[in-house]
Amino acid sequence: MTDLNQIYFDRAKAVIPGGVNSPVRAFKAVGGTPRFVKRAQGAYFWDVNDERYIDYIGSWGPMILGHGNPVVLQAVQEALKDGFSFGAPTLREVELVEEILKLVPSMEMVRLVSSGTEAGMSALRLARGATGRTKFIKFEGCYHGHADALLVKAGSGLATFGNPTSAGVPKEVVQDTLVLEYNNIAQLEEAFSLYGEQLACVMIEPICGNMNFVRASVEFMKRCRELCTQNGALLVFDEVMTGFRVALGGAQSIYSAQIPGFKPDVTVMGKVIGGGMPLAAFGGSKAVMEQLAPLGPVYQAGTLSGNPVATACGLATLKEIQRPGFWSSISETTEMLVSGLSKVAKDLDLDFSADCQGGMFGFFLLPELPSNYAQVMKSDGALFNQLFHGLLNKGVYIAPALYEAGFVSAAHTQIDIEHTIAVAHEVMSKLKRA
Ligand SMILES: *Cc1c(COP(=O)(O)O)cnc(C)c1O
């Protein structure tokens, strides 16, 4: 049988670097041919060979309602009739921002942009502009988009700043980025004692989906908050993945419930707020947000920002996830998947650990849940690749890299989950360590 995926991938590779417009899609980590998607509906997509897959990526998070939700589809179709883009204000931008503010009380004002990268980059500039400081802290394993100053890995020692993780990023641009180990309170304290009054912000993924699924401990988060407050640095939550995904109020609502009075100073959002359209945002207190142009000295702009079709899609999505029972239902489905996979692994005596929150999950071929990047990377990559391809060949599509999270949508049914667990049992029972 001709594999159209391979034919299209070859064609793509001739004209698009690596054949893809975002590197992870190329299957480089796991090998093999990426699936070209023809269409998607609910919990499934079909590739160009008309093979069906249960989709546990959902566009890397945005498709929390499943593909082609009829309410969202209608909102988008109505919006399209009135125009694609104006480069002038629309009421729907105000409505979307009001909706976000209602659901995430730490923010008083929000600016809309088009991608998570843009939102993270702008939040960093805002934190630097608002504090008049340049140094900041990020954590190894957290991804905040591909802005120059954020493409950094840890240097050789704590007193040294980071090294670029990409060619084309000048060393000078990352010399103020301090990269620390996630969940390491002693390192955090040392960094603040060395640089506290020079730090603009601490930027963190509160539940890190770019390390598959690693939670910041409550103690660690509490210490981040205290040290930022004591030193006049801003605590920036990157909730591009977790926002409206792990809970209606984002990951911050989970920490607020455990740390009295807790809130971040600035929040970065993306993915779910666009419902699959290019839309992202960053927000915080009025005092901080009023530093932005045209009110303040921190410049930021975007031709397509607050796009009328994207805001329609985002607004309809945010309304749908507020339906009664939505969160208990999606959490239940996700937990069913995670506990089912864990049981299969346990029965087969396979090293396995898993965690989930709301509609986001992660699992590791490790005996215990990791708490930082170095521990995540101890995973057996070859074993993961066998698991990945085994699932893929049987129509279950998970992320093609062991450090990426998984996503369940409201369209996933108990039958989908049971089928997935049965497939996983078959595949896991054949895994062979090298
Ligand atoms: C996806 C993601 C980004 C980048 O968003 P893009 O829309 O891909 O630019 C930033 N931060 C986190 C936590 C993300 O998961």
Image: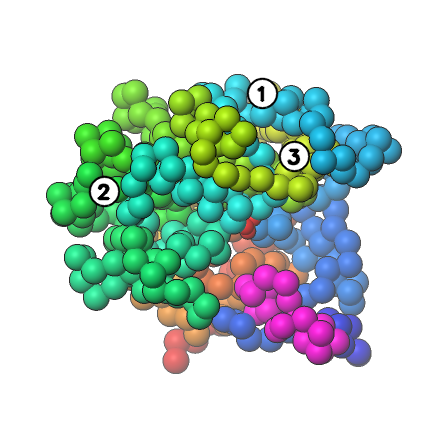
Give the label on residue 306, or none: 3
Question: Considering the image in quadrants, where does the C terminus appear?
Answer: bottom left
Q: Residue furthest right?
A: 81
Mark whose residue sits in front, 1 or 3: 3
The mark lying in front, picked from 2 and 1, is 2
Residue 278 quadrant: top right
Identified at 25% across, 63% down, the residue is 155
Residue bearing the label numbered 2: 198
Residue name at image x 56 percent, y 65 percent: 23
Q: Main secondary structure of the magenta part?
A: helix
How crowded is the residue under tag 1: few (<14 C-alpha within 10 Å), some, or many (20+)? some
For the residues carrying marks 2 and 3, which lies nearer the camera in this image? 2
Considering depth in this image, is 127 or 183 the residue closer to the camera?
Answer: 127
- Residue 172 visible: yes
Secondary structure state at the residue bearing disc 3: loop
Of the numbered discs 1 and 3, the one sitting upstream in the chain is 1
Magenta residues, start to end: 10-27
Is residue 18 within the magenta segment? yes
Relative height, residue 224 to residue 51 (above, below) = above
Question: Neighbour class for label 3 at 10 Å: few (<14), some, many (≥20)?
Answer: many
Q: Is the residue 386 above or below the residue 99 in the image?
A: below
Residue where numbered disc 1 is placed: 98
> Which residue corresponds to the image point at 31% horizontal and 53% vertical from the top-left?
177
Colour theme: rainbow
The reply to whether dot 2 and dot 3 touch (C-beta < 8 Å) is no
- The quadrant the N terminus occupies is bottom right
Q: Is 296 left or right of 60, judged from the image as shown?
A: left
Q: Is residue 40 magenta?
A: no
